[in-house]
Image (cartoon, grey):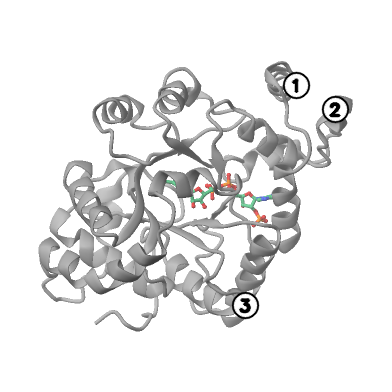
Amino acid sequence: MYGTRRAPTTRFDPVCAENDMQRMKSIPMDGKTFPSRRAVIGGVAAVAGVARAGAALGASDALRTLPRIGMGTWITFDVGRDAAARDARADVLRAFFEEGGRMVDSSPMYGSAEDVMGHCLDRAGRDRVFAASKVWIPSVGFGPEQIAASRALWGVERFDLMQVHNLLSYEGHIETLRAMKADGAVGAIGVTTSHGRRHERLARIIEADDTLDSVQLTYNILDREAEARLLPMLAERGRTVIVNRPFRRGAIIENLRGRPLPGFAAEIGVETWSQYLLKWILSHPAAPIAIPATSSVPHMRENMAAMRGPMPDAAMRARMADHVRAL
Ligand SMILES: NC(=O)c1ccc[n+]([C@@H]2O[C@H](COP(=O)([O-])OP(=O)(O)OC[C@H]3O[C@@H](n4cnc5c(N)ncnc54)[C@H](OP(=O)(O)O)[C@@H]3O)[C@@H](O)[C@H]2O)c1
């Protein structure tokens, strides 16, 4: 049923509104009854066999060995059927792989991004990709169907990481994901939040749920809510931290545009503000993976260079944050 990739049918307002339920209305249901969770989990058994055979590393180990800069796809890859834009995004993905990248993060919430990702993977190849997407639907029973649809759009045999987007229906979806992981139908499992929202609930989940391989949250030089409690909790428990909105959807770089880098940036091999911001994130003791989004090949190459060279120590991190705050 999902053997071929489908044309994108989902659009949403790119302004990241809090109201997930409202956006849910845009999810295509095609008027059909989705199969039960059990049926779909059973149906992926063939995929699971392939996955198990290739799974030399455990899910958590696979996450821990990834390059520390991944790629986001929100808005930047939501280009619909525009052929030139789709090919331009394939160039971005190719540059990402050439620079050593592996983790690509998307979601059924991101309009046509998953369909565009399938197109880009057709062109750039699937060998390097560590495919991370999300389940984002209120009805837990429809979760497996949504994951299967995403898998078909990407054209991957299974997701290396499947996350519960914005903790929506977390209690039910996480059960599905645990079952799929046990079956080898997904690799790692995790949850996401953003914009500093839902941190109290997230802290309770991290405390209670020792099955999570990763937690995705917002952390950047200006949005530091996660520092006080969540990041130390995650580091202590050995969970992989994935950082979204490293540039606050580009706004931080925009505000710094035209200002000279401070002299001390050269000490850590930083040549641009994007590298300054990314090195600051990557050097947190929780060793996060940052997933900046870009539609530009030069920006991709510039961002990926932040993985290389010296990293700031604690004193340098404090100096960097103070400097940006003072501007
Ligand atoms: N709840 C969730 O699960 C959640 C929520 C938010 C985000 N996310 C994930 O996190 C990813 C990243 O967050 P984000 O997309 O909100 O924003 P972001 O990565 O903080 O910023 C992306 C913006 O930065 C610009 N940019 C990137 N590199 C640049 C460079 N070197 N120089 C100048 N500008 C640059 C891009 O413009 P150009 O295209 O011009 O480069 C783009 O407009 C998302 O794409 C998504 O995968 C998840």
Counting from the top left corner in percent of width and height, residue 320 is at: 73, 23
Mark 3: C-beta under 8 Å from nearest atom of ligand 1: no
Kindly check if marks 2 and 3 are in contact, taking CB atoms under 8 A apart as contact.
no
Badge 2 is on which residue?
A: 262
The span from disc 3 to disc 1 (Cα, nearest Å) is 39 Å
Crowd around label 1: few <14 · some 14–19 · many ≥20 (10 Å): few
Task: Find residue 323 and name its label.
Answer: 1
Task: Find residue 136 and name its label.
Answer: none
Q: Amino acid at mark 2?
A: Pro
Q: Which of 156 and 219 lies nearest the eye of the viewer?
A: 156
Element type where label 1 sits in the image: helix
The span from disc 1 to disc 2 (Cα, nearest Å) is 8 Å
Quadrant in which residue 187 is drawn? bottom left
* x 29%, y 69%: residue: 49
Task: Find residue 87 and name its label.
Answer: 3
* x 53%, y 70%: residue: 79
Quadrant in which residue 10 is drawn? bottom left
Q: Amino acid at mark 1?
A: His
Quadrant in which residue 136 is drawn? bottom left
Crowd around label 2: few <14 · some 14–19 · many ≥20 (10 Å): few
The span from disc 2 to disc 3 (Cα, nearest Å) is 37 Å
